[in-house]
Image (cartoon, rainbow, N blue to C red):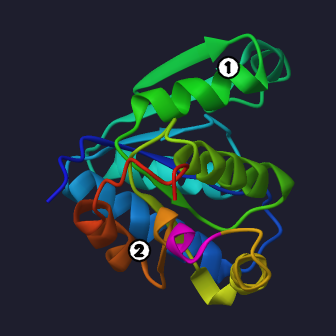
Amino acid sequence: MNQINSVCVYSASSTKIDAVYFQAAEALGRLLAGHRIRLINGAGNLGLMRSVADAVLKSGGEVTGVIPHFMVEQNWHHTGLTELIEVESMHERKQKMANLSDGIIALPGGCGTLEELLEIITWKQLGLYLNPIIVLNVNGFFDPLLEMFEKAIEENFMRQQHRDIWKVARTPEEAVELLYETPVIRKFAAI
């Protein structure tokens, strides 16, 4: 069983999405706090980013937000977090969030969330990130991406073993369980 003290959650900043996504984010936040897992996220003050952070905080947990200075200047940051870390760039933000985390959970989101998820999957494939990566497939949101991964494997752009880089959860409860249960595999790039 993995030692999980903190988890980075990638998620949407949109406020115009279906309530089912907000419910999943809030449930995930409560679970993280209940397991005494610190949330690491992008410190946004809108959408699922805010919902998961607020749920962690309301449940007695801790949240570290990492955000570029230019976003703070635009007042895009959550002002009630346990800790706010300002960085210079988006690249530095993603690196810092990964460095602080014992695992990743991706909630649904747009280009930013998808880009973060694909980058961390690539890092794990290369051995640059060793911790669990969980795709929380709320409402089947990630089905097209998962189908694309399968197509890449079928057409030999990826190997069969690369499926073990990420795990798919249907519920927040399953996502947290998978954080603890997913084995650390260090040799994806060599596969």
Q: Residues within 10 Å of mark 2 (few under 14, many from 20)?
A: many
Residue at mark 1:
92
Question: Of 159 and 116, which appears nearest the observer?
Answer: 159
- Percent across and percent down for residue 72 are 75, 19
In the rendered image, residue 140 lying in the magenta stretch gets the answer no
Q: Answer above or below: position of 105 versus 157.
A: above
Kindly indicate the quadrant of the structure image that contains residue 62.
top left
Residue at mark 2:
172
Q: Answer above or below: position of 31 versus 44.
A: below
Residue span colored magenta:
159-163
Q: Residues within 10 Å of mark 1 (few under 14, many from 20)?
A: some
Dot 2 and dot 1 residues touching (CB under 8 Å): no
- Percent across and percent down for residue 120 are 61, 47
The N terminus - image quarter: bottom left
- Percent across and percent down for residue 52 are 50, 55
**In terms of sequence position, does the residue under pointer 2 or pointer 1 come before the other?**
1
